[in-house]
Image (cartoon, rainbow, N blue to C red):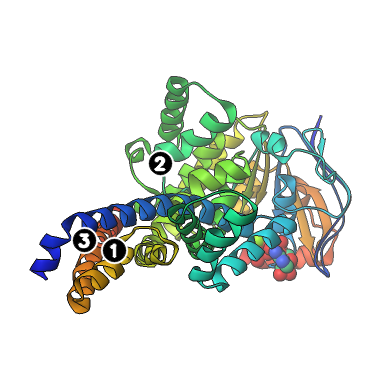
Amino acid sequence: MSMIEFHNVEKYYGDFHALTDVNLTINAGEKVVLIGPSGSGKSTLIRTVNGLERVQSGRLLVDGFDLADRKTDMNKIRKNVGMVFQHFNLYANKTVLENIMLAPRLVLKRPEAENKKLAMDLLDRVGLAEKAASYPRQLSGGQAQRIAIARSLAMKPKCLLFDEPTSALDPEMIDDVLNVMKTVAEDSSMTMLVVTHEMGFAREVADRVVFMADGQILEDDSKETFFDGQPNNERARQFLGKIITH
Amino acid sequence: MGYIISHYWNELVQGLGYTLLASVIALFFSTIIGTMFAIFEVLPNRLMRVIGRVYIEIFRNIPLLVIAMFFYVIVPLYIAKIDGFTAGTIGLTLYTSSFIAETVRAGIQSVDLGQMEGARANGMTYWQAMSKIVLPQAFKIIIPPMGNQFINLVKNSSVLAFVAGFDLMYQANSIASLSLDTINSYMVVGLFYLVITLPLSYYMRHLEKRLAN
Ligand SMILES: Nc1ncnc2c1ncn2[C@@H]1O[C@H](COP(=O)(O)OP(=O)(O)OP(=O)(O)O)[C@@H](O)[C@H]1O
Ligand SMILES: [Mg+2]
């Protein structure tokens, strides 16, 4: 069953053509890594999946809802599709525990005791139980990102989107976050779409690697083809060469 | 000054009471109305933004006295019987709300966009995100300018004197003409204003420090 389907999707920012004829299907439970040069439209693409960006034409089905249709209720989709941002976006006015508990309480009406237990379990899982009462500004970047992942997981989503989750982090914190992401990927029913240039992570976790440039998808390969064979597309080959020797 | 205070104590206390009452009412409602129009101004919907803009520009750019006179003279004539105190307080509320709207809007816009996006991506509705995440942060940022607005509001309540609102300024005028001691009458009333504004500005400063952590 497919979780995400792009059919001939076009996206403009004013006159700027940000996504051109995007076609992409991601099945439920699949782990897909999206790569490409800066400005190629990776963030734009991933942000259309939970309606943070609107698309102008084509069909974009997420969990059965058509996001290109203006009448679709975005809130319904966002309940099931979480997102982890480059800059964490933790709620600055809430404690770590409240960051995790707030949306389940407001949106899912999860009972308080259950909500708290689940939040503490998630904090344990990302190794930050002792930070429950801290505020986001008291956390390191790596800690903040792990909390952000826990916050997304608390909604029990079917699908998680990651937009360069480690690129704002100091090198020594990147592995902590990647390790948490790997544990998330162990759940075979969780669909993951990850923008990252961490090729080690992609090799280990991804089922597929998608390469885009100038708002177009130029390459969509299984992990094996992409890393061990050779991408067909010249630009994808060059790009891969660059980030791997990098 | 001692003479004025002891001789006109009742009038002064009454004036203080009316000034305080008008200020509290106007502060409460102008904060609510101002916040509402500030939100209009940042809404994705264009029509709402225009409505917000028009409201703010109207009440921000007309002298308070003119607005108060409108409610004192025109409204009783055509719409509803209201006394001077009510007319002045309504005028003061609407006038102040336009400045508060501008302050709150600036506060909302200074909150990182990622806060709204994080909340929306987390499944919250626009209103949940606005009320639980964005507005609390915005209000914390704007405590100092809001303090200024509140103090201006108390001082601007002296507009009530022109619409028979029985406030401190109204009493000042009447005490001055009764006692023929203009200087001391206004000096005493100035002190009475300080009784309201100084604690208010102290409190806002205290709030700012307490929330700064
Ligand atoms: N809100 C916006 N308004 C106008 N143009 C935008 C907007 N957001 C992105 N763009 C443009 O769209 C293009 C794609 O941007 P996008 O952020 O999706 O790229 P990206 O692949 O995520 O790049 P990076 O690796 O730098 O994050 C860029 O040229 C960018 O300038
Ligand atoms: Mg990006």
**Relative to residue B137, is residue A57 drawn left or right?**
right
Q: Mark 2: is the Cβ under 8 angstroms from ligand 2?
A: no
Q: Secondary structure at mark 3?
A: helix
- Pointer 2 and pointer 1: residues touching (CB < 8 Å)? no
Q: Nearer the viewer, mark 2 or mark 1?
A: 1
Label 2, residues with CA under 10 Å away: few <14, some 14-19, many ≥20: many
Residue B168: % across, % down:
29, 62
Q: Secondary structure at mark 1?
A: helix
Label 3, residues with CA under 10 Å away: few <14, some 14-19, many ≥20: few
Instruction: Give the residue type that dot 3 points to.
Output: Val
**Relative to residue A239, is residue B38 drawn left or right?**
left
Q: Relative to the observer, which residue lies in front, B45 or B188?
A: B188
Q: Relative to A52, is B151 above or below?
A: below
**Relative to residue A232, is residue B110 drawn left or right?**
left
Q: Which mark is residue A96?
A: 2
Q: CA distance from mark 2 to mark 3?
A: 42 Å
Residue furthest bottom in the image: B183
Residue B56: % across, % down:
59, 65
Q: Relative to the observer, which residue lies in front, B118 or B20?
A: B20
Q: Relative to the observer, which residue lies in front, B164 or A170?
A: B164
State the residue at coordinates (19%, 71%): B179
Residue A133: % across, % down:
33, 39
Label 1, residues with CA under 10 Å away: few <14, some 14-19, many ≥20: many
- Pointer 1 and pointer 3: residues touching (CB < 8 Å)? no
Q: Nearer the viewer, mark 2 or mark 3?
A: 3
Chain ID, mark 1: B
Residue B26: % across, % down:
43, 54
Residue at the spot of label 3: B195
Residue at the spot of label 1: B171
